[in-house]
Amino acid sequence: MLLYFACVLGIGAVLKRYVRTSEDFFLSGRSIPAWVTGLAFISANLGAQEVIGMGASGAKYGIATSHFYWVGAIPAMVFVGLFMMPFYYGSRARSVPEYLKLRFDEKTRGLNAVSFAIMTIFSSGISLYAMGKLLHLLLGWSFDASMLVASGIVLGYIFLGGLTSAIYNEVLQFFLIVFGFAPLVFLGLRDVGGWSGLVDRLGTVAHANGYAAGAYTRSWAFMGDAGANPVGVEWLGLVMGLGFVLSFGYWCTDFLVVQRAMAANSMTAARRTPLIAALPKMLFPFLVIVPGMLAMVVSSTGVGGPAAASAVVQGVPAAVTGAALSAPPERAAALRQGIVPPKLDPHTGNPLTDARGHVVLDYDLATPMMLVHFFPAGLLGLGLTALLASFMSGMAGNVTAFNTVWTYDLYQGYVRPGASDAHYLAMGRVATVVGVALSVAAAYVAASFNNIMDFLQLVFAFVNAPLFATFALGMFWRRATGHGAFTGLLAGMVAAAVHHGLSLPAGAQVGVKGGYLGVVTTYPSELAQTFWTAIAAFVTCCVVTVAVSLLTPPRSPDALRGLVYGLTPKPTDAVARWYERPAILAVIVLTLTLVLNVVFA
Amino acid sequence: MGIDLRTPVGGLFSALGVLLTAYGAATRGQPGTEPTGVPVNLLWGLVLLGFGLAMLALARRARRAGRSDRGP
């Protein structure tokens, strides 16, 4: 682990020599080859929420979680590479909000920049908080110390080398995560008797929870009816809400990921970035979801003979279920499913139960428990380093996106326009320090007010849902105007809030889960509600943007050249080798994704 | 620009591979080091080492090619 830290900071120090202008710092001087930006593209997204959260969803929903990849990511990644990157990269905008300014106007950019900057700070704070809590729980490390050390390292390498350093480290982190989690899948599958063993055992779990035998191991077969699958979503809401609105909104407009592609060394490389990223991305379900599924069914007594078993059971898991959470270990052990422990009431220490009297499992611990269960000392170090790497790459992604948007869009845009480049470079470094400091502060806020975080994430969901409508109209409809975009965005956010306020997931209390404006409809699950909220926001944003645009004067075609489809020359790809062409790559990616969907349907 | 990323990646994984292989070989057969009955430390250490060396080899080849391009 120390070796890794040294390596990370070493990269930052070496790269410092190459950072001379603010373009170098914020955009890596647009000089990075496509395979590097491609891996960084997914690694920035592969934060802690991804590794822990997808493991948790794998345990909770089974293979259907793969919809977040094969429906909710790959098509959008192909789209951004083929159709949107020409405008981002070609317009020479330095950030996503800046593109909005070029295409629409100042107020649309301001709205996007401010909401984005706040969002990155809080998401990196939440991720930091989750890391501190997890390390405390698993290893007994001090919450404050582990948070400060991790954020100090992230600060160190970004401060020195800017975006290049963050991107290089993200690639390093990508490989660490892959090599740290791959043996887990191998050992886990070996333990349950291969994939067919996993299917058998999860079939039993499905029966116990009132679903058909394949509900956890087949992704599409039970999507016809929301009540028949553990996700609680039917296919239309899934495809439209997740596959279209939410995933395109994230992958196509979030500067956090788009920034990586904008650092590429040519237009073709920028377009290839998300496509290259899609190749490993489509295999990630096996790396992050399968461990969660395995955690539900592996035998909790260990498998390597009595001595090894007791070493594992009495070692770290005992610390988790017993001492650290101050619950009677034998009682907690009896209630767990596989090796997923029950969630405990923080005040009484008793396991929580839901309305029907079932024990609520702490799914977030699925992947960490797998690590301590299967890895011996040695490999465990690698696994924990991988976990740390995922926290750091997620945080670094947020911090680099924050410092760029702050410096270019807010500071240069409103506070002090027209200063020298050296001034903005210095500002970028200051923003990095401030960004990390604010993240740490946000982590402490998260630690003390859990409900505030739920509330904030809700607000982010409202802010993000209509974004893709604005970008799609802006890029492909030349008549769309700044006033239209701005009112459309606002209307979309309000629509999301209203829809959320009028609906409630089944079995939830009125409050932060929705229903605060009166319950008109109920959805079978929280995810279904989220998806339909996004759809409502998207449709509203489209309708309002179009209506207001038609009522306001259009901009002249000359002003929109390079920014809108139809007024921009088609990008030509001057590469010799067929596999370097974005269109061909896109076809390969989509075909493979389709195959995966069919195989696991 | 600057450094070829394959060099640090290869270096880190080679070093990790050597450490893990050595640790796995040294603790072979001791209770608690192989909870699944597979000498994972040893095997995975070799995998890491292989990956690291492959990365270093690629970086080396690219450097050579770059030099001969610019050569006399």
Image: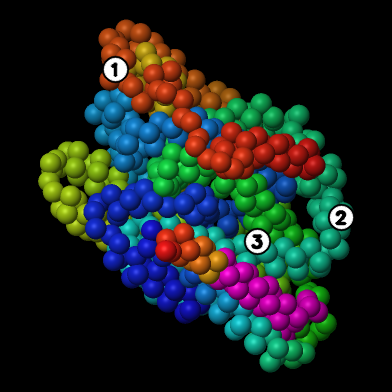
User: Which secondary structure, mark 1?
Assistant: helix
> Can residue A531 be seen at all in this image of the molecule?
no
Tell me how far mark 1 sits from mark 2, CA to CA: 61 Å
Residue with the mark numbered 3: A366
Q: Nearer the viewer, mark 2 or mark 3?
A: 2
Residue with the mark numbered 2: A196
**Residue at (43%, 57%) from the top-left corner?**
A167
Q: Residue furthest top?
A: A551
Tell me how far mark 2 sits from mark 3, CA to CA: 21 Å
Q: Disc 3 sits on a residue from what chain?
A: A
Q: In this view, does A505 lie to the left or right of A373?
A: left
In the displayed structure, A455 sits above or below B33; it is above
Closer to the chain start, of discs 1 and 2, is: 2
Residue A273 locus on image (x, y percent): 51, 45
Q: Do labels 2 and 3 share a chain?
A: yes
In the displayed structure, A112 sits above or below A285; it is above
> Can residue A186 be seen at all in this image of the molecule?
yes
Q: Residue furthest front?
A: B72
How packed mark 1 is, by other alpha carbons closer than 10 Å (few <14, some 14-19, many 20 or more), is few
- The image shows a total of numbered marks equal to 3
Tell me how far mark 1 sits from mark 3, CA to CA: 55 Å
Q: Which amino acid does label 1 sit on?
A: Asp
Q: Which amino acid does label 3 sit on?
A: Ala
Question: What span is in magenta?
Answer: B32-58
Q: Is residue A263 left or right of residue A298?
A: left
Check whether the beta carbons of the residues at disc 1 and disc 2 lie within 8 A of each other. no
Can residue A267 be found in the magenta stretch?
A: no
Q: Are marks 1 and 2 on the same chain?
A: yes
Q: Which of marks 1 and 3 is in front?
A: 1
